[in-house]
Amino acid sequence: MRYGMIMAGGSGTRLWPISRAARPKQLVPLIERDGQLLSLLEIAAQRFADVVPPERRYICTNERFRPFVRERMPEFSDDQILGEPIGRDTVNAVGLTAAILHHIDPAAIFAVLTADQIIEPVPTFTKLLDLAYTLVEQDASRLVTFSIKPTYPATGFGYVERADPIDNTDNLAFTVERFVEKPDEPTARKYLSSGRFGWNSGMFVWSAATFLDCIRRFEPACYDGLTEIARAWGTPDYHSKLTSIFPTLPKISVDYAVMEPAAHEQQHGDSKTTICTILADVSWLDVGSWPALAETIDADSASNRTTGPVIALDSTGCLAFSDNPDHTITLLGCENLVVVHTPDATLVMPADKAQDLKALHEKLPDALK
């Protein structure tokens, strides 16, 4: 059967001071939709509509975020929230889900979506998600990734090179030639002009059994721990197993732990899996910084983008964000600034310094992180 999981355990330091360690960006209502503010996690959950029934949708997040998830998304039961006692990178988040789903249903096929992206139009992506499930239902050895049709030579994303098209998919699905880490700008320009590359989205669909077998072969220490935890699912021993074993697992990403060695096997003709990609011609925004979030907000005639009470005069290209309806931000003669107000911290910075915010975050006292 089809299942779905949203990874929602990140810290979101480049969206400080709205995003905090106790309540990171994916749980904060940031995005306006139909007159209301929604969290990135709520928006991500909508991508499963008409593809995965509500009772087979899961969220993998840090255990301390459980109360916020239950508050914003009561349709997810406690059993549908897989709480990590500590973050151990993406292969263990996905592996924990795979191990539990395989314990529940040995034939489980599940999608891995992320909680920090805006993808539009949703119906287009939903059709591609359905295609990904179908590909794995036809051949359980397939590891399906989503690659985004690039619109500029981005250097901040990894790339996926497509090989041969898969029959009967209307040139939407392909086998994968290789994965490439973040390139320099000249290389990114070559990738864009070739027409063979897409941005690596970090979203997948695969069989739980196949993914677990990949972990068993490539990261056996992770496999042994995750399967021991999963065997205790639904018993009084589950939480003690989780809290004692999970923090000891090797910390590694799913790309390094599974996708790269699987691609290496495939290139050498001795693979037990087939890596495929679906090319998604959609609007895709990784909401990882204030300038990225600004792209989700309509601009005024002076290219200012604002949320909350803001008055701007002789100012252009600014982002101003206040989460307090009783606190007004005023801008006079400002250009290309980011101004963010919260009850206990205010951020003011040039927009082109947004990538340096993580360094500032490291200097903050713990009470403000």
Image (cartoon, rainbow, N blue to C red):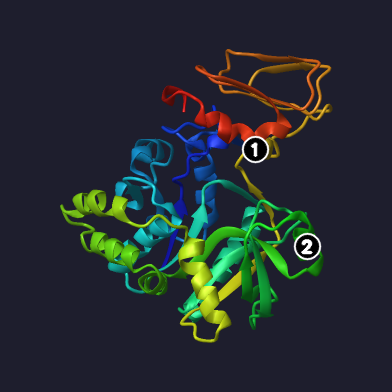
Q: CA distance from mark 2 to mark 1?
A: 24 Å
Evaluate whether residue 51 shows in this view. no
Is 159 left or right of 84, judged from the image as shown? right
Camera-side residue of 35 and 94: 94
Kindly state the secondary structure of the residue where label 1 is placed.
helix
| Dots 2, 1 in contact, CB < 8 A | no
The residue that disc 2 covers is: 192
Quarter of the image for residue 22 reads: top left
- At x 45%, y 55%, the residue is 90
Give percent across and percent down for residue 264.
54, 76
Is 157 in front, or is 221? Answer: 221
Is residue 242 in sight in this rendering? yes
Q: Nearer the viewer, residue 196 or 65?
A: 196
**Quadrant of residue 310 in the image?**
top right
The quadrant of the picture occupied by the N terminus is: bottom left
In the picture shown, does residue 139 fall above or below 238?
A: below
Query: Closer to us: mark 2 or mark 1?
Result: 1
Residue 190 on image: x %, y %: 79, 64
Pick the residue in front: 326 or 181: 181
Tell me the SS state at disc 2: helix
* Residue type at the position of mark 1: Gln
Q: Quadrant of residue 4?
A: bottom left
Mark 1 surroundings: few (<14), some (14-19) or many (≥20) residues within 10 A = few
Question: In the visual, does 73 lie left or right of 165?
Answer: left
Residue 249 has which mark?
none
x 51%, y 79%: residue:
265
On residue 355, which mark appears? 1
Looking at the rendered structure, the kind of residue marked 2 is Leu
Figure disc tally: 2
Residue 197: percent from left, percent from top: 71, 67
